[in-house]
Amino acid sequence: MESPLSLSAILLSLEKQISEHREREAFHAEREAFHRDRRAEHAAELEQLLKSFETLKASAEHAAKLAARLPQEPPPPSDDLPVGRKVPISQLVQKVIERKGPQEPFGPVDIAAEINQRYGPRLKRKKDYDPRQVSVVLRWMAKRGRVARTQKGRPWSGSQYVRVG
């Protein structure tokens, strides 16, 4: 079997292929070193990011658990108001004052607003209570020793009281 190529042509072809493959091997070896370095950089960055991610995730879960354990609000106190009957303003003022702290200051405007907000929808009387009406009750309670006046003012505003006992 004779080959159409001469020995010198075969050698020349093989040398050319060897040369080409050496160049490609050198090129890929260079790329391999470059990619190895880049891979190492990315691996190190990935490790830092994973640590930060896990730490932040654990912290967020812990914060969510803490936020979820909010203290439950106590149920609203019962009003004990007779339904559909007229309730004296003095009784309403006294109920509001009972919920105040011993040294918490209040005035007729505050008490009237709280009565209208808390008891307004349940009262037979549809008109809002006026601070002047509340002021009369507070002065009467001050004379009886149930509240103490800490600041003198006009009947409709300015007076401040605190609960006694």
Image (cartoon, helix red, strand yellow):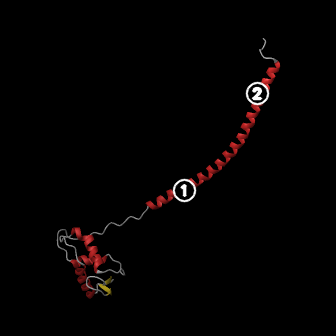
**What residue do we see at 26% from left, 76% from top?**
112
Q: Is residue 49 left or right of residue 161?
A: right
Which part of the image, by quadrant, shows the N terminus?
top right
Secondary element type, mark 2: helix
Label located before the other in sequence (1 or 2): 2
Give the image location of residue 57, x and y in percent: 53, 54
Give the image location of residue 13, x and y in percent: 78, 24
* Residue 139 sits above or below residue 99 on the image: below
- Figure quadrant of residue 109: bottom left
Circle 2 is placed at which residue position? 17
Q: Is residue 107 left or right of residue 63?
A: left
Outermost residue, top side: 1
Q: Is residue 98 left or right of residue 81?
A: right
Q: Is residue 99 left or right of residue 21?
A: left
Mark 1, Cα crowd under 10 Å, few <14 / some 14-19 / many 20+, is few
Q: Nearer the viewer, residue 141 or 38?
A: 38
Can I make out residue 80 in this image? no
Circle 1 is placed at which residue position? 56
Tally of numbered discs: 2
**What residue do we see at 82% from left, 18% from top?**
7
Residue kind at label 1, given as amino acid type: Leu
Give the image location of residue 114, x and y in percent: 28, 73
Which part of the image, by quadrant, shows the C terminus?
bottom left
Give the image location of residue 77, x and y in percent: 30, 69
Mark 2, Cα crowd under 10 Å, few <14 / some 14-19 / many 20+, is few
Residue kind at label 2, given as amino acid type: Gln
Outermost residue, right side: 8
Nearer the observer: mark 1 or 2; the answer is 2
Q: Nearer the viewer, residue 65 or 139?
A: 139
**What residue do we see at 80% from left, 27% from top?**
15
* Residue 76 sits above or below residue 40 on the image: below
Secondary element type, mark 1: helix
